[in-house]
Amino acid sequence: MFKSFVFFVVIVAYSEEIYGKRLIVKRKTTTKSPVEAWTGKWFPGPPHPKDPWKGKWFPYEPYTSMKNLDMSHKQDLKAYEICDDGKQYIGVDYDPNNIQQTFEHLCLANRTLYAPNMNREALRMEYFIPPAYEAPIKCLNETISYDTQLPTFGAYRPIAPKYGSYIFLPAQRWLSSLSQGAIVMLYHPCAYSGQVKLLQNTLRACLYRHVITPWLGLSSERPLALVAWGNSLEMSVVDDHLVVDFIKQNAKQRPDLTTGQRNKTKMYEAGLIQEAHLVTDENDVEICGYKEGM
Ligand SMILES: *[C@@H]1O[C@H](CO)[C@@H](O)[C@H](O)[C@H]1NC(C)=O
Ligand SMILES: *[C@@H]1O[C@H](CO)[C@@H](O)[C@H](O)[C@H]1NC(C)=O
Ligand SMILES: *[C@@H]1O[C@H](CO)[C@@H](O)[C@H](O)[C@H]1NC(C)=O
């Protein structure tokens, strides 16, 4: 889906020492230069003049835009015409009642391989996204797939998930949270529970606008991650400084940010274990406030 992406993205990797010798962050940034000539028509890549366009539409296909998905006019739709109500047909992405899908949140590998390693540096990824890019919002009659194990931007479903912790939340939903400026915490089901709890406690204390879910797309080297729109931080060991820095830098950094969650009567909550608690207010006026002076 993002095939053409690789043609113009150059990964610039360099190591950076933070807080003395304690931690090394490997930072990868997608460069801006090759797309500077981009005039605002296509993303991730322009269609070849001779080929029919098979990539993503930009800014959106007519029916995938939020503007054209005004739910209030769709009350009388028949079941098969339902775009997305957060309840029916959600199995397209993940069916919480299907026992065969429990592998999404069970540790089926050798847990020792996921053990925390103090010597393994964290990995920070920053993707350049053209400011004019508008992610497609797709109904359940269209599949959404990502060509990376750790997507940080792209298409998502119209109904956003409630903030909180999930047995499992599919990417098609948490990408929607990212688009609202939320921080998503992912952990491999085989990650050490002590580390998972550490990260979870920091995130929950920092802001209301968060989602937590297991995610098989993480490596055994770094089974813990925080994700924001266009940004990720993968870790073997939780370091509070890095985590708080990432959250403060990346939370609520979305231009189309609406206040709080869109409409609480229509939200996805399948597999929700614990709804997020307010830390300051619905808009998270202060992020990681308790960590001031750290
Ligand atoms: C999916 O459903 C939407 C809303 O009902 C509709 O407008 C759109 O044409 C459908 N797309 C496909 C590919 O069937
Ligand atoms: C798991 O991996 C460790 C380290 O590679 C190894 O020592 C251990 O025998 C493995 N355990 C199982 C059950 O395979
Ligand atoms: C949220 O959606 C419900 C059901 O469509 C509607 O009745 C309500 O007015 C909406 N609330 C807001 C604040 O838009």
Image (cartoon, rainbow, N blue to C red):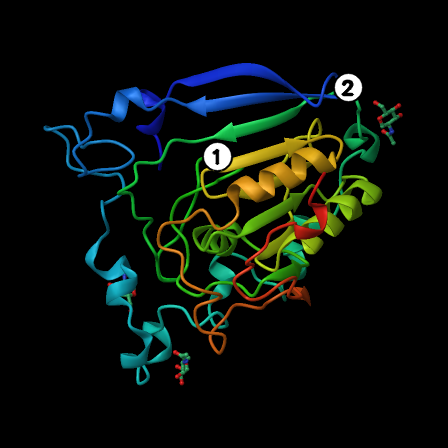
Q: Is residue 115 above or below residue 207?
A: above
Residue at image location 63% in from the left, 32% down from the top: 234
Amino acid at pointer 1: Thr
- Residue 144 left/right relative to 161: left
Rendering coords of residue 101 (x, y %): 63, 55
Residue at image location 29% in from the left, 20% down from the top: 33
Q: In which quarter of the image is ligand 3?
A: bottom left
Picture quarter with the N terminus: top left
Residue found at the very far bottom of the displayed protein: 76
Q: Between residue 260 and residue 231, name the one nearer to us.
A: 260
Rendering coords of residue 249 (x, y %): 53, 40
Element under disc 1? loop
Q: Mark 2 points at which residue?
A: 119
Q: Would you identify the image quadrant in which residue 100 lies? A: bottom right
Q: Mark 1 points at which residue?
A: 148
Rendering coords of residue 151 (x, y %): 48, 40
Q: Would you identify the image quadrant in which residue 198 lies? A: top right
Mark 2 sits near ligand 2, with its Cβ under 8 Å away: no
Amino acid at pointer 2: Asn
Which numbered disc, 1 or 2, marks the residue that appears first in the sequence? Answer: 2
Rendering coords of residue 21 (x, y %): 74, 16
- Residue 95 left/right relative to 289: left
Residue at image location 30% in from the left, 40% down from the top: 131
Q: How crowded is mark 2: few (under 14 residues within 10 Å), some or many (20 or more)?
A: few
Residue at image location 61% in from the left, 26% down from the top: 123
**Which mark is nearer the camera, 1 or 2?**
2
Element under disc 2? loop
| Distance of label 1 from label 2 (alpha carbons) | 26 Å
Q: How crowded is mark 1: few (under 14 residues within 10 Å), some or many (20 or more)?
A: few
Q: Between residue 46 and residue 261, name the one nearer to us.
A: 261
